[in-house]
Amino acid sequence: MEVKVSWNGPSGMSFRAETGSGHLVSMDGAPEGGGHNLAPRPMEMVLLGTGGCTAYDVVLILKRGREDVRGCDVTLKAERADTDPKVFTKIHFHFTVTGRNLKPAAVERAVDLSHDKYCSASIMLAKTAEITHSFEIVEA
């Protein structure tokens, strides 16, 4: 896997990132750090990627288990250390899984498998952060 991140220039702290799969992403810093608040912060991107990684796992596990899953949202709330390096110290994942006749045990199993075995992003973050999760099921 390879990505390229390029600074957009002398006026600000925005960056353009190109993924190995050919997609472009913008990032920017906070105004107090010289940014213009025109795109997500790099650390927000870390959380976004982690949310995408674990939601992907949950949907795939439920589908493979022949559950009638129709939607999956995950909200991540994180806390960071006060001093540099400002690593994540706590992250809570809340899943809202929508479907028909979803079994709570199946959803709980999918979330647990993602966090314990499959989602490399959340497993890496667990080295510095206390990871917790919850879920709710919405009938479609």
Image (cartoon, rainbow, N blue to C red):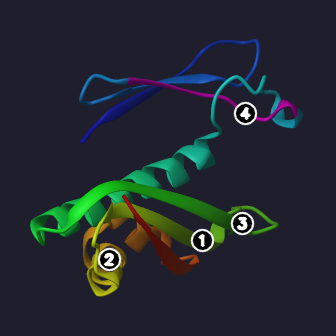
Query: Do tag 1 and tag 4 residues touch (Cβ < 8 Å)?
Result: no
Q: Which residue has dot 4 on it?
A: 29
User: Percent from the top left, x then y, of residue 64?
Assistant: 11, 66
Range of magenta residues: 24-31
Q: Which residue has dot 1 on it?
A: 91
Residue at 59% over, 41% down = 42
As drawn, 65 above or below 28: below
Q: Is residue 35 left or right of residue 42?
A: right
Characterize the local packing of mark 1: few (<14), some (14-19) or many (20 or more) Cα atoms within 10 angstroms.
Answer: many
Specify which label sits upstream in the sequence, 1 or 3.
Answer: 3
Q: Which residue has dot 3 on it?
A: 80
**How far is mark 2 from mark 1, CA to CA?**
19 Å
**How far is mark 3 from mark 4, CA to CA?**
16 Å
Specify which label sits upstream in the sequence, 1 or 4.
Answer: 4
Residue 14 location, quadrant? top right
Residue 53 location, quadrant? bottom left
Q: Verify whether residue 38 appears in magenta.
A: no
Specify which label sits upstream in the sequence, 2 or 1.
Answer: 1
Q: Is residue 33 left or right of residue 20?
A: right
Asked whether 46 or 75 is in front, the reply is 75
Q: Determine the secondary structure under disc 4.
A: loop
Residue at 54% over, 44% down = 45
Of the residues shown, which amino acid type is indicated by label 1? Ile
